[in-house]
Amino acid sequence: MPRKKGEKNSDNLGIALNTAITFSGIILLGFIYSFSKNQLHDGIEIKPIISKTTSQPILAKDIYIQNPIENIKVEVLNGCGVYALASQTTEFLRTKQIDVINSDNADNHNYKKTLIIQRNEKFKSLKKIVETFGVYLTDSTHVQTLPDESLGVDVTIILGEDYTSFAELNNYISANY
C-alpha cells in the first residue's frame, strides 16, 4: 500500500521524537548515576587541627596601652614640591601615634621654612608636634598660631625646603624611602 505525503512526515517526526526521548533518558541516567556516586562516596575524613598555644593573644586594648594614640588631629601639607613628602611625613607622625587626617599639597611650593600652625585652643597638641619636630615653642620662624576651627584639625604642618633639618623626620625618610 502506497504512503501518503502526510504519513512520511509523521514517520520522520516520530523518529526524531523517539531519538530525543532516548537522548534525554541517557542524560537522566547519567545524572542519577552521578548523584548516587556522590551520596555513597565515603571520602576521606578531614580532622581539624587546633593549635595549642600557651600564650594569650594580644588584645587591641594591650596594644593601645603600650602605644596610646594621641588625641591630636593634624593635617600635613607639602609646601616645597618634593615628591611624596607629605605622605612620608604622615607615616612618620603615625609612628608617633599622631592622627593625621589630611595629607596633601599646600597652596604653593614656595615655602622656604616649615610651618607648624596651631588651629585651635588645644595647646597640648601643638606642644606634642613641636617636640616631635625638635623645635622650640618660641621659634616664631616655625611655630605660628592662626586659629581656624573650620579646618577640623588641631595643627597644620606645611613642609618647607628646610624639612631635612628635622633630624628625626629626615632619618625616618632616609631609612624607609
Image: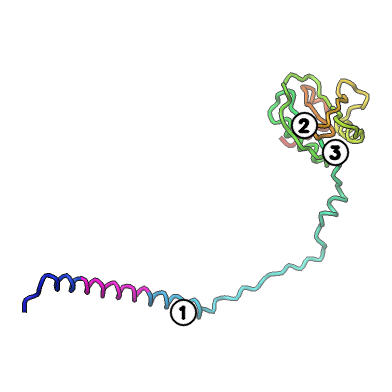
Residue 166 quadrant = top right
Disc 3: which residue: 72
Query: Which stretch appears magenta?
Result: 13-27
Quarter of the image where the C terminus is located: top right
State the residue position of label 1. 36
Judge the density around disc 2: few (<14), some (14-19), many (≥20) Cα neighbours within 10 Å: many
Identified at 71% across, 27% down, the residue is: 105
Measuring from the top left, give residue 133's x and y in whole percent. Answer: 85, 31
Secondary structure at badge 1 equals: helix
Could you classify mark 3 by the number of other residues whose Cα lies within 10 Å: few (under 14), some (14-19), or many (20 or more)? Answer: some
Q: Marks 1/3: CA distance?
A: 66 Å
User: What is the three-letter code of the residue carrying label 1?
Assistant: Ser
Cα separation, mark 3 vs mark 2, equals: 13 Å
User: Quick check: marks 1 and 3 in contact, CB under 8 Å?
Assistant: no
Residue 136 horizontal side relative to residue 108, left or right: right
Residue farthest left in this picture: 1
Mark 1 / mark 3, whichever is N-terminal: 1
- Front of the two marks 1 and 3: 3
Query: Would you name the residue on which mark 2 appears?
Result: 76
